[in-house]
Amino acid sequence: MAISTILFIVLLLLLIGAIPAWPYARGWGYRPSGIIGTLLVIVLILMLLGAF
């Protein structure tokens, strides 16, 4: 359970860091946050199902 929680927190922090609201991230568009958000949803579903 600890590894999945740590992975969830890391993905959440990456998602916040990839949001194109800061000047260094404006040129990226929404692609990085969309990919990380998708990974976050997959990990969350796996955590809720107990498979991870």
Image (tube, rainbow, N blue to C red):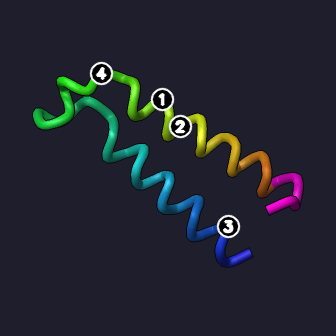
Q: Quadrant of residue 30?
A: top left
* Marks 3 and 4, the one that precedes in the sequence: 3
The structure residue drawn at horizontal position 59% and vertical position 35%, both measured from the top left corner, is 38
Q: Earlier in the sequence, mark 3 or mark 2?
A: 3
Q: Is residue 4 left or right of residue 33?
A: right
Quadrant showing the C terminus: bottom right
Label 1: few (<14), some (14–19) or many (≥20) C-alpha neighbours in 10 Å = some
Which residue in the structure is indicated by mark 1? 34
Alpha carbons under labels 4 and 1: distance apart: 10 Å
Instruction: Kindly identify which residue carries mark 4.
Output: 29
Compared across the picture, whether 36 is left or right of 43 comes to left
Q: Mark 3 to mark 2: distance in Å?
A: 16 Å
In the depicted structure, whether residue 34 falls above or below residue 1: above
Label located before the other in sequence (4 or 1) = 4
Query: Badge 3 local density, few (<14 within 10 Å), some, or many (20+)?
Result: some
Q: Secondary structure at mark 4?
A: loop
Amino acid type assigned to the residue bearing label 4 in the image = Gly
Q: Where is residue 24? Give x, y as percent.
A: 13, 37
Decide: few, some or many residues near mark 2? Use Cα within 10 Å; few <14, some 14-19, many ≥20.
some
Q: Are marks 1 and 2 in contact (CB under 8 Å)?
A: yes
Question: Amino acid under label 3?
Answer: Ser
Q: Earlier in the sequence, mark 2 or mark 4?
A: 4
Q: Verify whether residue 33 appears in magenta.
A: no
Q: Residue 7 versus residue 21: which sits nearer the camera? A: 7
* Marking on residue 37: 2
Dot 3 corresponds to which residue? Answer: 4
Per the image, label 3 sits on a secondary structure element best described as helix
Residue 44, image x and y in percent? 70, 49
Q: x, y (%) of residue 33?
A: 42, 34
- Magenta residues (range): 48-52
Image: 31 above or below 4: above
